[in-house]
Amino acid sequence: MSSESTIHSQEGVISSAVHEAHEVHHHHHEESFISKYVFSQDHKMIAKQFLITGMVWAVIGGLFSVIFRLQLGYPEMTFPILEDIFGKWAAGGRISNDFYYALVTMHGTILVFFVLTAGLSGTFANLLIPLQIGARDMASPMLNMLSYWFFFLASIIMFASLFIQTGPASGGWTIYPPLSALGQATDGSKLGMDFWLVSMAMFIVSSLLGGLNYISTILNMRTKGMSMTRMPLTMWAIFFTAVLGVLSFPVLLSGAILLLFDRNLGTSFYLSEIVVKGEILPNEGGSPILFQHLFWFLGHPEVYIILMPALGMVSEVMSVNARKPIFGYLAMVGSLFAICILAFLVWAHHMFVTGLNPFLGAFFVLLTLLIAVPSAIKVFNWLTTLWRGNLRFTPAMLFAIGFVSLFISGGLTGIWLGNSTLDIHLHDTYFVVAHFHIVMGVASMFGMFAGVYHWFPKMYGRYLNNTMAYIHFWVTLAGAYLIFWPMHYSGLAGMPRRYTDYTNWQSFNMFADMNRFISTVAMVVFAVQLLFLFNFFYSIWKGRKVTTTNPWGSNTLEWTTPVNPGHGNWPGEIPEVHRWAYDYGKDGRDFISQVEPVGANESKH
Amino acid sequence: MTGFFILAILALAFLVTFQIAKSSEYVSILKGEEKTFQQNNRINAFLFIVFLVLGLAGAWWCNELFYEKTLLVQPSASDHGEQIDKMLWMTLVVTGLVFLLTQVLLFWFAFRYQYSEKRKPYFFAHNNKLELIWTVVPAIFLTVLVGFGLFYWFKITGDAPKDSQIVEITGKQFNWMLRYPGKDGVLGRKNYRLTDASAGNQLGVDWEDGASHDDIENTELHLVVNKPVQLVINAQDVIHDVGLPHFRMKMDAVPGIPTTMWFTPKITTAKMKEITGNKDFVYEIACDQMCGAGHYSMRGIIIVETQEEYDVWIGKLKPQYAQVMDDKQKASPVTTAPADTVKVSSTPVVSKPIAQNR
């Protein structure tokens, strides 16, 4: 195999949708830089594009959180350097209120959509689907390419909004109208909000193009013998994720378009009886609550869109490195399915205190707490997978175990918040911040890290540096708990989220020390993420080379391809699959690849 | 300058880490990959146990530091809050036990079953009985939590008692405005198009409605201890939220859709000063829904007092209508029509349909 790293040696051919097994790889087309690295239709290159764009966004979004944590941790201090960089937004070295809310809003938007949706699903769905089901590429490489470029367009628009005179959107990532509809109410709801909405519309197009592609590829292009129940759990997770996205993102699109109408065309979908800054608006008959329904009908599935790929990758990584089958494969699939269905039926638990009919609220309590059942099944199945295994702590495995810990911690507080009675007290306090950051933010990030460490050899034909990976893992895990665990306490004191300054509040000003501590840890954790990025980019070119096709001793199909697979993935015929993906430690054998026919004397399980 | 130093130190730390990391790779080649792997595996397995122990100790320490600062050490200031606290403790016990059990198992298994050349992993693909157990047991616990949760939920969100005090609270960027119904117990009708702060009508009350004439407007929320109160909640510009941490209550204020919330205050401000040992104690209203640049400063005050104190306080206040008419007369005594000619509606008017968004 070529000793160059993938990025130098990929011999993929950009022929649209050529899936026949003929010898595309032996043609050695000279590809232009543009067709290979920019407008590539190779799913592996598109995955890398999603990943690296996601990383750029993660640095921006993470940096924003560091800046606003400065304000929260050190409200009395001034940072002249901020004024040098941000001008009027940090006049006198103090973060202005408008700036603070812009930072919080963009942090949420960027991390939820651009990093953990596009960066996570976009990367691993693209990379793994064809490789793990045994296909040469996606069902439509062209749409796949467009999916990335619509994401890129959305990114450009969102990035541009950061430089508008009146600032980017600043009404929170949930952009509730009327705040987001009325430029008079806040500067962020002027031009910045239009940019936000248009960017999200592009993002939704990208997400739909990608999602439809994922679904059709998984349903139609599995190799011979790869029945649905033989697919690795990553595939199931990504499949359900795509289904969720395809069914829920259009609802957000409709919500966003109606909001654009309200903002620019004088309609009253969300506006009624408003007096803003002394100005009496003519709008009557709309409902701000309607927007919340539309938003959360995506918004809640969205958190599972973020989480489910992580659930799948963690299952896969854990089984491989425990050298033991995933426990309860069918129960794992079933619980993913249950989560997928329930994800559509719980959106109003974000709205218990909006004046929602309490009777209706009761159903949402029931359905919300029901999600704890499949989640519990998953946790216990993971624990049983570890039980009596032979655990190899590769960096990916560390992150997988860290994921389970965070999923438990954050999931259990969901049982508090999903209960409307407790939500009355805890709604919009720091308890919520702690809950969703742990279970959706950090946990999904851990799933993503597990994926990157595990499949980096497949992407680039090299390994990441282990020592840096260990430092990355331990500091991030400890940091995540140090940052978010104490927040439960300020939440239990009723401390509201999204305040720039608590010093004037008798009820909440006793947490100044805690806030300073959290801010300090946040900066350390951010720095360690930069270490990871350094490791990532350094290793692309200088990492230890992968010398074997199957470095982790894994059963799945991606490890039957060459170290640096070209466009089309397998040089010869696509392998046939004869068994499920989890025959580890069976009949005294370390692992049995999916492509190996079932032997005559093999035991059944 | 300090910023520069911090950056320099960071860069140095990066460099050192990177060099160590890089050299460890060379060392591993010298030592043999298998041996390095085993060594690293042991270290990481050990760190999992260290993390578990330190983590549990840290959680304990965190509790020592911050428990006193939460509301859990104070009795709830409202009857609903007491039920919410009960629910909270119940949930804490259930989830706390599950937390301990699963986290300990997770990190213990990670340590216990770390790689060893001798161990053969146990091929264990599924077991219906086990899976059934951890489907049914969580389901039972959750049913109990849902049951209690809904029981309290319906009590809290049920209809307010008939003898409730009614107070209207309206949010706007960035303060709260209160309106008390006066002797008739009925709030006068409103029409947002009549809002005119310069004319003393910042709430947009329709003075044509006689029920509005004795309504009192103020900036402080005064409540009578042990008397149920129903808040009628409005917003003028964007969504706000009436957050009452000490009462454990919360309800959004939505423009165009009035909401309600009721509870019975149990502890007067004076008593709460004794309980907390804080002579400056005051009940605060916190806006809990992001409402713009001044969101963090949208603070209101609640005074809970005895009926006698309340009567004295409200007795001193003049209805807004009378004030407006006084001002008008002062400004142009000739042209203004006398206030008494406004027809006083005889039928009690419900101020505005108090929708609950049903």
Image (cartoon, grey):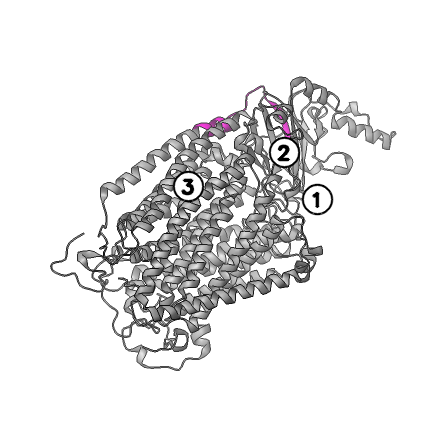
State how far apart marks 1 and 3 are (Cα). Answer: 42 Å
Q: Is residue B177 above or below residue A560?
A: above
Q: Position of residue A587 (x, y in %)?
A: 17, 57
State how far apart marks 2 and 1 are (Cα). Answer: 24 Å
Assess whether residue A488 is covered by the magenta stretch: no
Q: Residue at x 57, y 24 (%)?
A: B264
Assess whether residue B158 is covered by the magenta stretch: yes
Tell me, for residue A202, which label it has, or none.
none
Instruction: Label 2: state its secondary structure.
Output: strand
- Same chain assignment for discs 2 and 3: no
Q: How many marks?
A: 3
Chain identity of mark 3: A
Instruction: Label 1: state its secondary structure.
Output: loop
Question: Given the image, on which type of amino acid does mark 2 rest?
Answer: Glu
Q: Which class describes the residues within 10 Å of circle 3: few (<14), some (14-19), or many (20+)?
A: many
Tell me, for residue A412, which label it has, or none.
3
In this figure, which residue is indicated by the disc labeled 1? A277
Which residue lies most toward the right here? B334
- The magenta stretch is B151-170
The N terminus of chain A sits in image quarter: bottom left
In this figure, which residue is indicated by the disc labeled 2? B284
- Same chain assignment for discs 2 and 1: no
Between A528 and A110, the residue placed more toward the observer is A528
